[in-house]
Image: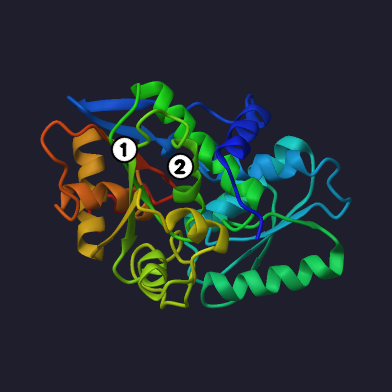
Amino acid sequence: MTTVTHAHVRAAAERIAGHVLRTPVIETSPGRFMKLELLQHSGSFKVRGAFNRMLSAGEVPESGVIAASGGNHGLAVAFAARALGVRAEIFVPEVTSAVKVAGLNALGAHITQTGAIYAEAAEAAAKRAAETGALQVHAYDQVEVVAGQGSTGLELVEQTGGVDTVVVAVGGGGFAAGITLGTAGSSGAPKIVAVEPELIPTLHAALEAGSPVQVGVSGVGADALGASKIGGLAFEVLASPRVESVLVPDEAIVAARRELWERHRLVAEHAGAAAYAAVMSGVYRPEPGERVAVVVCGSNTDPATLTTG
């Protein structure tokens, strides 16, 4: 298996500069930071990996690009494709929210909604790519995608001057792996707290088993953290002493999402609030004086539901 490195992340950051936003970091209290990746183009960090994959490919085939997604990756691929003038075909499962499907339509993507969960949509997308020759942009298990997501970690280190701990949500693991690599070049590389819903423990189960395994997919984070198996590239990076895997219940994610709105006026989707839920609920308790950054990673949600669940 190809290994993703810190050098890949640095190269990706240079390649996508000018295509993605340098999202802000706010210090909510002394030594407590939030990286607001929910303010990124297309509403999540995913656009970093999408741009890096497409720009790394050189010439994109006439058939364009194809991706399977719970929603956010599809939005990112569609956004990047429109910016680069190429066709995008996106496969999403039935669990994908209406807000995300509407966003894909607005970006001009060709949408196929099929399968109950992400894995089934991914199977259909792979079959379609084999038929058309389109460039596949995987949601989390491609070197270029992981490296692109890792540019978030580079920014975070520069913006904070370095932290002791980064708390980040895990679905397929590409984002957490990228941030782990992106922060690895800093002196005193931070601990990574990898947060998953109790109902979708892809990394947690893989660490217990010693290799990626299938898990069930359900709960409030299913449309964005709905991978049924951790990516191989991500597992290679995240099976590290630097990484602590924690699980949060759905009720904690719902409460964290509500607090992000009520306290900070941040419109986060459930998956985007998962990392914050780990700290707010006490699943992860920072030590006194520990400098902690929480990544709030997605905003594609219906604002009308912010106070109701």
Amino acid type at image mark 2: Ile
Numbered disc in front, either 1 or 2:
2
Residue 24, x across and y down, in percent: 40, 26
Disc 1 crowd rating (10 Å Cα; few below 14, some 14-19, many 20+) is: some
The number of numbered badges drawn on the structure is 2
- In this view, the residue in front, 294 or 234, is 234
- In this view, the residue in front, 293 or 19, is 293
Residue that badge 2 annotates? 179
Q: Is residue 67 left or right of residue 156?
A: right
Instruction: Please say if 94 is above or below 196.
Output: below
Q: Residue at x 65, y 32 (%)?
A: 11
- In this view, the residue in front, 53 or 245, is 245
Residue that badge 1 annotates? 266
> Spatial distance from mark 1 to mark 2, Cα to Cα?
22 Å
Quadrant housing the N terminus:
bottom right
Q: Which SS class for mark 2? A: helix
Quadrant housing the C terminus:
bottom left
Q: Is residue 20 left or right of residue 300?
A: right
